[in-house]
Image: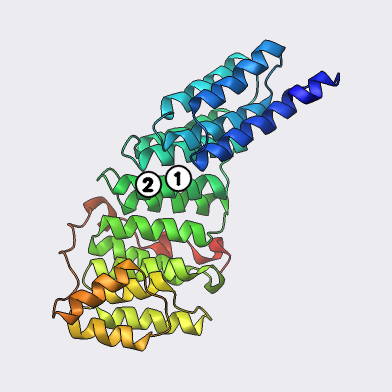
Amino acid sequence: IDKAESGGLLIGARAFSGLTSLVAKAAGAGHATRLDLDAVLEAMATRGVVADATNYVSHMEALAKLTRSGEASIKDGVALLQEMRSKKVEPTIELFNVLMDLCAKATSSGAGQPQDGFGILQWMSSFSIEPDRTTYNTLLNLLAQSARFGKARARHGLSVLERMRQQGIAVDRYTVGSFLSLAKTDASVSAVQLARQVFEATPAQERNQRVYALMMAAEARVGKGREGAQELLDLALADGIQPNTYMLNAALQACKTAEEVLEMRAQLPHVAADDLTRRLEKRARTGLAPMSYPPKRDDPQLVETPGYTTFVRPRSMNL
């Protein structure tokens, strides 16, 4: 920018949007801090550059990346949106999606909660902006993160799926993956049963290795053993999905005895091992089965809702 200005070029909002995006990318890789973002904003102010919607999106992206390091928070994202309103700059769907991502990243460290995500949906409604699949997928990720701290359960994810149904938005592998992750962390029998219904209603082309691994892990969490894992492995092969390390580990953790672990590993000899695989094998060779825990108590509010196959009609999912 300095070189361009020395050549007599006038630098406007678009160039600074690119520079802010660069800060966001660098922050995501751990190579930029809040000071770098502040320097860009100061340079804009010095030159009298007026921020447009694109600038605010890139600014929000930088804040989202800085949230993981603790240099930004949900309050910063909300304050930026309020600044837009005060300067009469209309927010866009892209900005709200990045704000949702910021909230999800904050939630992963325990600093956020489901109300933050659902509050963004209300805010979008006040601007007559409809959420899209990215909005809902990111909200489901937020809920899955929140469940780790006991702040969300599968019924919260079910309400997101219902919103998608009402808008006619088809699920994809990211939708399903985040919901299965939420159900796995919920760890109740009713949540995992619901997750299986969601899995089975998902088009085969959207069931990738991550989806299969999460489904196996969720069922293992509530005590469905090797047979359940084997059923999913067979189904994956029928779908043309080759097991990877995550699927292998999920299958090993579903086993209830050391012998089953060693047999399952022998069945998948060509799948690469990682540290978890080696730990499970080491335990099995000493006669120890994978660690297991009893399912958590069912959520009464989920048990009282209708099943997924009726709650979210298949035709709305483009099956």
- In the image, 245: left or right of 91? left
Residue at coordinates 42% horizontally, 56% vertically from top-left?
178
- Disc 2 target residue: 143
Q: Nearer the viewer, residue 63 or 79?
A: 63
Left or right: where 176 falls relative to 191: right
Q: In the displayed structure, would residue 239 be above or below residue 182? A: below
In this image, 216 relative to 64: left or right? left
Element marked by disc 1: helix
Residue 144 at what x, y percent from top left?
Answer: 36, 50
Colouring style? rainbow
- Which image quadrant is residue 290 in? bottom left
Residue 91 in sight from this viewpoint: no
What residue do we see at 67% from left, 17% from top? 44
Does the residue at mark 2 contact the one at mark 1 (Cβ under 8 Å)? yes
Q: Residue at x 25, y 77 (%)?
A: 281
Q: Is residue 245 left or right of residue 253?
A: right
Q: CA distance from mark 2 to mark 1?
A: 6 Å
Which residue type carries mark 1? Leu
- Quarter holding residue 21: top right
Q: Is residue 31 above or below residue 56?
A: below
Residue kind at label 2, given as amino acid type: Leu
The answer to which of 298 and 256 lies nearer the viewer is 256
In this view, the residue in front, 175 or 12, is: 12
Q: Which residue is mark 1?
A: 139
